[in-house]
Image (cartoon, helix red, strand yellow):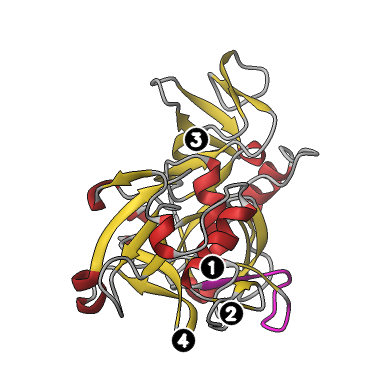
Amino acid sequence: MKHLMKKAVKAAVFAALTTLALTAFASAEGEMAIGAGCTTGTSLRMRSEPNTSSAIVTTLNKSVAVALLDDSVPGWYKINYNGSTGYVSSDYLIIDQDNIFTTYGRVPEGTVNVRAAATTESESLATIDAGTVVTVNGLVNGWYDVTCEYGTEGYIRSDLLVLTSNATSGKGSSIVETALSHLGTRYVYGGASAGGFDCSGFTRYVYSAAGIDLPRSADEQYGVGYSISMANLQPGDLVFFSTYDSGISHVGIYIGNHQFINAASDGVSISDMDSSYWAARYIGAKRVM
């Protein structure tokens, strides 16, 4: 989504005619996108309603692409990201002005057709299943311009695809989203529940929600899956460190952009792998998905 981040202008209100035209594409599966935006704030809270007192649906990383569903409420945008729908403050979202951008999209359920043109009457070039990830190149009249894994280029209706920040399977994205939903949870030594976590209790809890059973301790978790180099890290991978003791003594979940989420002394928080503290203590990474 680097294309969006280079824009210096603040979000502009879409023309009324554009909104009316796109509304005609709405279907029972969900809401059509009227545009795309890029987050500018770290740990940005998506809320259930357009106010700061409503429930937090999830939190978003910085520099991720989101689908814009509605811009009619002053100071707020209704968006969808990775299957979650809610509102974010317009102060932390830049709206793309030409609808040309690069990110990823995932089929959340069922099967969808990749069409030759942005219309349901056009030829189906391919059919892709739930969990499939495609590259999204832009938005055309409520349809995403996509490139599939083996090079097929076409269009998918925007309400049948959810934007995500990585090219991994839906499971990796799901793990990250679950982890982020527990930001701020307090640290509890030996804790492995939503009431409080230690580092390995947190990773075990999050992975369990995705149907993956991890061992209890950090060093035992380092013994499962297969090793991944730092250059090939993907969101959802486990990252390991040596902190208070020799060998593996801390674990977190990589979320992208050289950041990971972990249960540390200040609770569940996001840390920078490139910081002097964590870079000096990094041991390695494992992929278990």
Tell me what residue is drawn at x 77 percent, y 38 percent.
27
Q: Which residue is mark 1?
A: 202
Mark 4 or mark 1, earlier in chain: 1
Residue 272 seen: yes
Q: Give the mark, 1 or 3, whose residue is nearer the N terminus.
A: 3
Which residue is rendered at x = 49% and y = 73% of the image? Answer: 43
Q: Earlier in the sequence, mark 1 or mark 2?
A: 2
Q: In the image, is residue 207 above or below residue 269?
A: above
Taking depth in this image into account, of 129 and 197 the one nearest to the observer is: 197
Mark 1 or 3: the one toward you? 1
CB under 8 Å between discs 1 and 3: no
- The quarter of the picture where residue 119 lies is top right
Helix, strand or loop for the magenta stretch, by majority: loop
Residue 100: x percent and y percent?
A: 41, 44
Q: Earlier in the sequence, mark 2 or mark 3?
A: 3
Find residue 266 and name its label: 4
Q: Cα distance, mark 2 to mark 3?
A: 31 Å
Around disc 1, counting alpha carbons within 10 Å, would you say few (fewer than 14), some (14 to 19), or many (20 or more)? many
> Can you identify the residue that label 3 sits on?
133
Closer to the camera in the image, 10 or 16: 10
The count of marks equals 4
**Label 4 – label 1 distance at C-alpha:** 13 Å
Q: Is residue 75 above or below residue 238?
A: below
Mark 2 and mark 1 in contact (Cβ < 8 Å)? yes
Q: Which residue is mark 2?
A: 185
Residue bounds of the magenta highlight: 44-54
Residue 71's x, y, as percent?
63, 63
Work out how far the residue at label 4 is from the one at label 3, CA to CA, in angstroms: 35 Å
> How far is disc 1 from disc 2 in space, using C-alphas?
10 Å
Name the residue type under label 4: Asp
> Which amino acid does the dot numbered 1 rest on?
Phe
